[in-house]
Image (tube, rainbow, N blue to C red):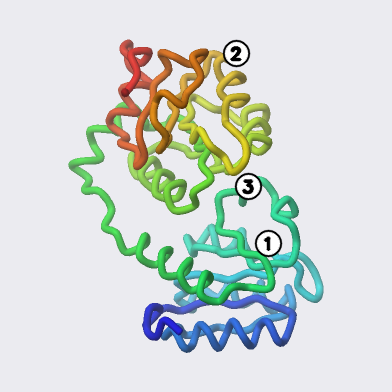
């Protein structure tokens, strides 16, 4: 199965069901990865995740370990900039909204899909960051601003987060749901927002309405045809995915922001 696609990658595996852990570990090793684990209990998982001498490229986390939920480990991984994939028998609603944009795979786990997900994570991480010279054009507009990202495609959300942080923005989210976005709007400082139009089975328009009510600028980011946007939102900035920060900055923070991007 997909021999060598994870060659040289180190993966932390947290899973308390023996057969599932063995199957995932074997699939990872067959793909060329070095597996740390499987680890089945939270205490040892915390110790392993906190060990900065271990170089990890990604982490596969079962939500419910033998002695507790895995979210403290997820927080450590994200602080270390280690990408996380949740693999669980729980419904995705069991995952707190702050993790809403992270990959989520249901048990029984499709090993090929898991390997594909990890390979895509590693490919995204290997893309060189924009140069400081290029980023400087954005800095004046984004630096110090709190930017909400609402996006249900993990890799696009993470790429946008990285770009914004590179130019000095404070990222709020990302979140992948309307509920999570509204919660952040109500509890966080937000200076502007980038909104994916289609979030799973929902549309982002309730979030847009709340932002407009609070006079917080936003842009729509979508792969859909502009004609798909309801007429009520005509005049708001619209950018096609993948997002371009220079155009978004102009739409959000300049006097011409209402002219849109389309």
User: Residue visible at 47% across and 60% down?
Assistant: 81
Q: Quadrant of residue 105?
A: bottom right
Can you tell which quarter of the image residue 116 is in?
bottom left
Mark 1 is surrounded, within 10 Å at the Cα level, by few (under 14), some (14 to 19) or many (20 or more) other residues, namely few
Say left or right for 258 vs 207: left
Q: Is residue 27 above or below residue 174?
A: below
Determine which residue is flagged by label 2. Answer: 213
Query: Counting residues from the N terminus, which is met first, the one under dot 3 or under dot 1?
Result: 1
Residue receiving disc 3: 98
Question: Relative to residue 69, is residue 40 depicted above or below?
Answer: below
Image check: 245 left or right of 203?
left
Between 215 and 178, the one lying in front of the other is 178
Q: Quadrant of the C terminus?
A: top left
Looking at marks 3 and 2 on the same chain, the residue that comes earlier in the sequence is marked by 3
Q: Position of residue 29 (x, y in %)?
A: 49, 87
In the picture, measured across the screen, residue 231 lies left or right of residue 165, that is right
The number of callouts visible is: 3
Considering every residue shown, the one lying at the far left of the view is: 133
């Amino acid at each position: 199965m997909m021999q060598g696609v994870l060659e040289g990658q180190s993966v932390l595996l947290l899973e308390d069901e023996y057969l599932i852990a063995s199957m995932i570990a074997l699939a990872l090793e067959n793909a060329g990865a070095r597996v740390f684990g499987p680890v089945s209990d939270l205490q040892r998982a915390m110790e392993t995740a906190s060990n900065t001498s271990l170089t990890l490229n990604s982490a596969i986390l079962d939500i419910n370990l033998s002695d507790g939920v895995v979210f403290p480990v997820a927080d450590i991984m994200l602080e270390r900039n280690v990408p996380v994939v949740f693999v669980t028998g729980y419904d995705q609603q069991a995952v707190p909204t702050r993790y809403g944009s992270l990959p989520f795979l249901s048990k029984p786990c499709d090993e090929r899909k898991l390997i594909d997900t990890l390979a895509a994570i590693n490919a995204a991480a290997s893309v060189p960051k924009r140069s400081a010279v290029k980023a400087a054009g954005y800095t004046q507009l984004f630096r110090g601003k709190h930017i909400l990202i609402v996006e249900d495609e993990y890799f696009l959300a993470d790429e946008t987060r990285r770009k914004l942080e590179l130019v000095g923005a404070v990222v709020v989210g990302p979140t992948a749901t309307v509920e999570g976005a509204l919660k952040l709007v109500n509890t966080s400082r937000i200076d502007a927002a980038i909104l994916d139009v289609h979030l799973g089975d929902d549309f982002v328009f309730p979030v847009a309405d709340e932002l407009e009510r609070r006079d917080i600028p936003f842009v729509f980011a979508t792969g859909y045809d502009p004609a798909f946007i309801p007429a009520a939102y005509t005049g708001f900035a619209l950018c096609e995915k993948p997002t371009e920060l220079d155009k978004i900055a102009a739409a959000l923070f300049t006097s011409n922001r209402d002219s849109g991007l389309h």
